[in-house]
Image (cartoon, rainbow, N blue to C red):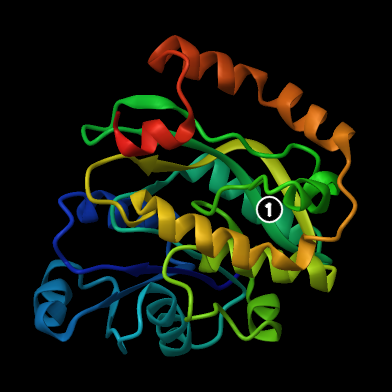
Amino acid sequence: MKRLLVITPTLGQSPWLDATVTSVAGLGPACRHVLVCPAAVQADLEKRFPQALVVVEPGGGMYAALNAGIAAAGDSDAITYLNDDDVLCAAGTAEALRRLEQNPETGVVYGRVSLVDARGAGQGWLPVAHRTGDLAALLARGIVPLAQPGTWMRASLLAALRGFDASYRLAGDLDFFSRALARGARFEFVPAEVARFRLHPGQLSKDEAAADAEKCRALVRWTDAPSSPLAVLRFRRDNLPVYLDRVRRHGFVSMRRIYRGD
């Protein structure tokens, strides 16, 4: 892709922000990185990261910040966003972008996302659907079948769907994927590590009650959709190594407990 865009909303306080920015820089000069932050830290971030465009957040939460970053960056071909504690993986990202460039009908490409702790040590993987034809059936069962980090979206699709819904605080990415799939957008999966998601205290994603409510809202359009037991079986089968690795590392615990740090 010729014009790549990564948006990172940040308060400017993350101890991992340097690693986040470095991982984006590894994608080369075709990639523009936009940091969206409070006005109080704009000057500091501009000094620390002169290679990035630093934009003041408009208020209204993370998804409003993402929309503002996209608007400030101007024209792009492919867009992703990256939290200020996560990192992109260059090899998997390159493969995802090749898929997006080679297949003009594809709107979203996602891959495998590993879990790391505060020090960067591996903590397992997030389960994702390997068969994109199963995405709708999995959503109908309330299963989130892909991970946001490292997922690239065609800019034209984002524009057609008017970006992210800023009324969400935690699940605006899931809402976008849900809307894109309902619109008929084509998704592709690459069996490569595209990003690393960092587990640490204080994450927004640990607000379980709010996250559950927003998940239900994002998936409401699939309430009456057909649910295929075979799709669920394929999802479980394809992610069996992920589940076995989780048991080896953490014992018989759910992803929810891992997020909480129990």
Q: Is residue 5 above or below residue 134?
A: below
241 or 194: which is nearer to us?
Answer: 241
Let me know if residue 1 appears in the view: no
Where does residue 18 sit, x and y in percent of width and height?
Answer: 21, 54
Q: Which residue is mark 1?
A: 98
Vertical order, 152 against 249 (above or below): below
Quarter of the figure that contains the C terminus = top left
The residue nearer to you, when weighing 76 against 204, is 204
Instruction: Give the image quarter of residue 193.
Output: top right
Q: Position of residue 144 (x, y in %)?
A: 63, 48
Q: Please give the name of the residue rendered at 61% of the width and 67% of the height, measured from the top-left corner.
A: 217
Residue positioned 26% across, 49% down in the render: 19
Q: Amino acid at mark 1?
A: Arg
- Crowding at dot 1, Cα within 10 Å, few <14 / some 14-19 / many 20+, comes out as few
Q: Nearer the viewer, residue 4 or 163?
A: 163
Say above or below: 119 vs 79.
above
Q: Is residue 216 left or right of residue 181?
A: left
Quarter the N terminus occupies: bottom right
Residue appearing at x 61%, y 60% in the figure:
216
